[in-house]
Image (tube, rainbow, N blue to C red):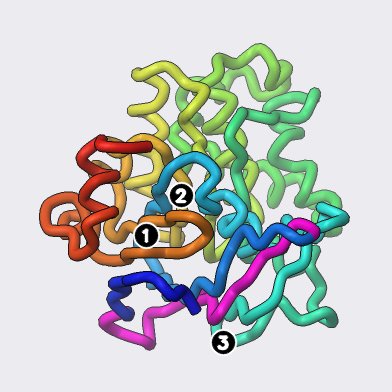
Amino acid sequence: MASQETYIVPAKNHEQVILETNDLHVWYGDNEAIKGVSLEFEENKIISLIGPSGCGKSTYLRSLNRMNDEIQIARVTGEILYKGVDVNKPDIDVFEMRKNIGMVFQRPNPFSKSIYDNIAFALRRHGIKNKAVLDETVETSLKQAALWDQVKDELHKSALALSGGQQQRLCIARAIAMKPDILLLDEPASALDPISTAQVEETLMELKENYSIIIVTHNMQQASRISDHTAFFYAGNVLEYNETRKIFTRPKIQKTEDYVSGNFG
């Protein structure tokens, strides 16, 4: 566990904990990027992971659905419990697990396909061929991502013709088409203009009614606007984890206060 001062508030209702990590460590070769992080995430909440560049927040996020498996020199130890099941064990079907823990990346990455096929692609790979089911899922996903009204008459046009903000919301729609329980987002608005950022934030606020959302953000205002809880990462540790309003108004750790006050970053 971390040797420096920490302040981590456990979940109020453990029956609502959908995901947690226990003593999670991540190494890239000999470099220990995550140093024994233990956190609990409640369902139907937005949790922000904040901290300076290189603090480990994106590495931690990528661990939650085993994305670090794709990095040859990466090694992950500790527990990642999804509904009580340790998905960090070697016998876990990672492909199936990612249906339940979806991910949206920093830059919009739509496939070079139509808007419709971007969403239907994964469904077809999972054996869903019924056109009525595909049509309904495409429409529902685009509505949940607040994009349907803008693209409903252009579903068979290239997704690459969309604006940056629309592309990112399409990627969110693509992720939720598989009906995951948890949505991971790695700085999803960092490449977007302020209007598109506001639209993505509004989408996430609506989605938390049906999903548990964990988001890495470097934008302090964004974290304070949309998240219920916030974890402050520093040098591979979590120094503080609490309700967002407390993190930003009454932090318990001096370094947290220094960071959210803009004294370093």
* Amino acid type shown at disc 1: Ala
* Amino acid type shown at disc 3: Gly
* Amino acid type shown at disc 2: Ile
Sequence-wise first label, 3 or 2: 3
Q: Is residue 247 left or right of residue 183?
A: left
Tell me the element at label 3.
loop
State the residue position of label 3. Answer: 84
Residue 20 among magenta residues: yes
Tell me the element at label 1.
strand
Query: Callout 3: 10 Å neighbours few (<14), some, many (20+)?
Result: few
Q: Position of residue 143 (x, y in %)?
A: 47, 39
Q: Position of residue 85 (x, y in %)?
A: 63, 85
* Residue drawn at the location 62% of the way across and 50% of the way down: 103
Q: CA distance from mark 2 to mark 1?
A: 10 Å
Magenta-tinted stretch: 11-29
Q: Which mark is residue 231?
A: 1
Query: Callout 1: 10 Å neighbours few (<14), some, many (20+)?
Result: many
Q: Which mark is residue 215?
A: 2
Q: Position of residue 38 (x, y in %)?
A: 48, 76
Sequence-wise first label, 3 or 1: 3
Q: Is residue 70 left or right of residue 249?
A: right
Q: Is residue 141 above or below residue 80?
A: above
Instruction: Between label 2 and label 1, give the one nearer the viewer.
Output: 1
Tell me the element at label 2.
strand
* Residue drawn at the location 37% of the way across and 59% of the way down: 231
